[in-house]
Amino acid sequence: MTSAATRQARWRALAVEVLRFLAVGGVAYVVDVGLTNLLVYGVGRGGPMADHPLPATVASTAASMVVAWLGNKLWTYGHRGTRTTVRAVVLFIVVNLLSMLLRLVPLAIAWYLLGLRDPVSYNISNNIIGMALAMAFRFLAYRRFVFVDNAARPSTAAAHE
């Protein structure tokens, strides 16, 4: 294969991976946004966590993490020779906790510093700005640390030679 064909194949594979990541993320996003809004605003009269948007976001993030793990493990990165190890699960959780902190920053600024507590401000700060920051971080971290292709890793014997 020529170098141009190799580059083209790599770009195509990356594009497929990005689209799958976005599709899985879209499903997890619907779970996350739906649950966080239900917890904070409820159906009509306010939710059970109306005065606690940060814990509500933590709870909804935990639910969406399960969806994201399954979708990314089985589909987005399913073509990679990844194994489900304790290390991979721990890294997945760490990456998601860090991305959740990135997501909470715009929400905390809007809710506590600016006093913007209406549903539109809440959703813009939490589910658009915060989620965009978290999504970019997760994509890079998943590829680099969590769903690493075992075939691309140097073997321990080769690494010590």
Image: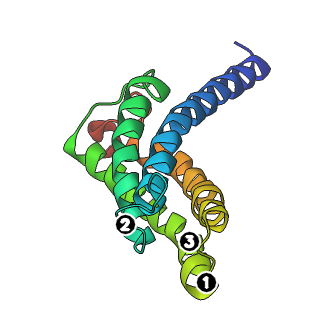
The alpha-carbon separation of the residues under discs 3 and 1 comes to 10 Å
Q: Nearer the viewer, residue 126 or 87?
A: 126
Residue lying at 56% horizontally and 71% vertically, measured from the top left: 107
The alpha-carbon separation of the residues under discs 3 and 2 comes to 15 Å
Residue lying at 64% horizontally and 84% vertically, measured from the top left: 114
Can you tell which quarter of the image residue 149 is in?
Answer: top left
Tell me which amino acid carries mark 1. Gly
Q: Which of marks 3 and 2 is nearer the N terminus?
A: 2
- The secondary structure type at the circle numbered 1 is loop
- Measuring from the top left, give residue 70's x and y in whole percent: 35, 32
Q: Mark 1 points at which residue?
A: 115
Q: Which of 115 and 61 is in front in this view?
A: 115
- Measuring from the top left, give residue 158's x and y in whole percent: 33, 37
Q: Name the residue under label 3.
A: 107
Tell me which amino acid carries mark 3. Leu
Residue 154 in sight in this render = no
Using residue 130 as the reference point, say whether residue 141 is left or right of it.
Answer: left
Residue lying at 60% horizontally and 52% vertically, measured from the top left: 136
